[in-house]
Image (tube, grey):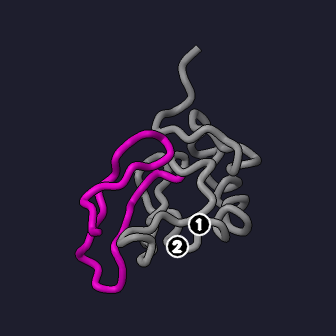
Amino acid sequence: QAPLVVAVPSGMQRAIDYTDETAPVLAVKLQELFGLADTPRIAAGKIALTLHLLSPGGKPVQVTQDLRSFWQRTYPEVKKELKGRYPKHPWPDDPWSATPTHRAKPRR
């Protein structure tokens, strides 16, 4: 019911931090969640994880328990701000149908 890790859409396993008393935290680069509409939950779906969405550089960009709202409202602003800073990473217009990844764009 309280797993130590959770699989994210990129195929990676990411640790869940239980030190915050309000809710368990999942820190993950936002590109690893492309295609995921709803916030991951644990305890048979009863507890939503607090997502610490990270930039490709590993810095927090957003904290949310509502991933759907982030994609709809905040992602376009985050994309605009970070696309120039991290040009080797994907910043799709449609994060709902984008392929999740934990890597930068492949070298040519």
User: On the image, which quarter does residue 90 sit in?
Assistant: top right
Quarter of the figure with the C terminus = top right
Q: Look at the picture and state if 17 lies above or below 79.
A: below
Question: 28 left or right of 24?
Answer: right
Secondary structure beneath label 2: strand
Q: Do the CB atoms of the residues marked 2 and 1 lie less than 8 Å apart?
A: yes
Foreground residue among 106 and 57: 106
The 10 Å Cα crowd at callout 1, few under 14, some 14 to 19, many 20 or more, is many
The residue indicated by pointer 1 is 67
Residue placed under numbered mark 2 in the picture = 64
Q: Which residue occupies 41% across, 77% down?
A: 47
**Image side of residue 89 versus residue 1, left or right:** right
**Image spot of residue 99 (x, y percent):** 61, 38
Q: Quadrant of residue 77?
A: bottom right
Residue 15 lies within the magenta run: yes
Q: Does the segment drawn in magenta span residue 13? A: yes
